[in-house]
Amino acid sequence: MKCLFLLCLCLVPIVVFSSTFTSQNPIDLPSDATPPTPVLDVTGKELDSRLSYRIISTFWGALGGDVYLGKSPNSDAPCPDGVFRYNSDVGPSGTPVRFIGSSSDFGPGIFEDELLNIQFDISTAKLCVSYTIWKVGDYDASLGTMLLETGGTIGQADSSWFKIVKSSQFGYNLLYCPVTTPVICPSSSDDRFCSKVGVVHQNGKRRLALVKDNPLEVSFKQV
């Protein structure tokens, strides 16, 4: 509602000025819009929606570990459908991902607070194509939270919208934002309805899930 109100306010001066000036008398209106802040990878380069990245930890050793696609315990899905994090930064590399922004106004960049989809960027069988896009699953009573899994959709108002925000410590945090009007307001600093993404332990593995405290601290490394 707030976004629609602001949109209406933005349209009012356009209507007024269009009735006063013609194409022979163009006018440049000043803009108070603050340009979005790009998300940076570990080398300081801006993220690009056309490239692939690994989501890595800002910590080392047992506190580290890349994010990867794995098989969910007790799942009957025909393909790997869980979003996990390795137990250490010593070992396998994570599964590459692509970030797909909800707004193309500023080119292929990915920006802080922008609503986006996250997709594992891997070769897969036709049967498993739909098991690459992140979403938040149903509530898991045994763990007391909602787990991240795959099977989402791109650009739809469902359980597949996330944000990257600057961490108060190091790197970035991921937020899950269950909005319903991303096309109208693709970028917003109002995160009251967003949830932090962190880690819970499931069958000896670190599973990404929604948490109240201790969000996941991550950085991004181009593949």
Image (cartoon, rainbow, N blue to C red):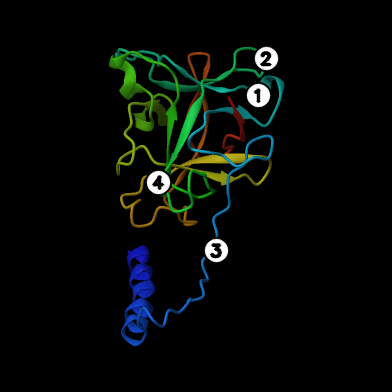
* Rendered image: mark on residue 34: 3
Marks 4 and 1: which is nearer the front?
Answer: 4
Instruction: Point out the tag, 3 or 2, that comes first from the N-terminus.
Output: 3
Residue type for callout 3? Thr
Dot 2 amino acid type:
Val
Number of other residues with Cα within 10 Å of mark 4, as a class: few under 14, some 14 to 19, many 20 or more? many
Q: Gap in Å between the C-alphas at discs 2 and 1?
A: 8 Å
Q: In the drawing, what numbered circle is on residue 174?
A: none
For the residues carrying marks 3 and 1, which lies nearer the camera in this image? Answer: 3
Q: Which residue reaches farthest right?
A: 60
Residue placed most toward the observer, 176 or 209: 176
At x 58%, y 24%, the residue is 223
- Whichever of callouts 2 and 4 sits on the residue coming sooner in the sequence is 2
- Decide: is 37 above or below 131: below
Residue at image coords 38%, 15%: 124
The disc label shown at residue 64, or none: 1
Q: Earlier in the sequence, mark 3 or mark 1?
A: 3
Q: Is residue 158 above or below residue 97?
A: below
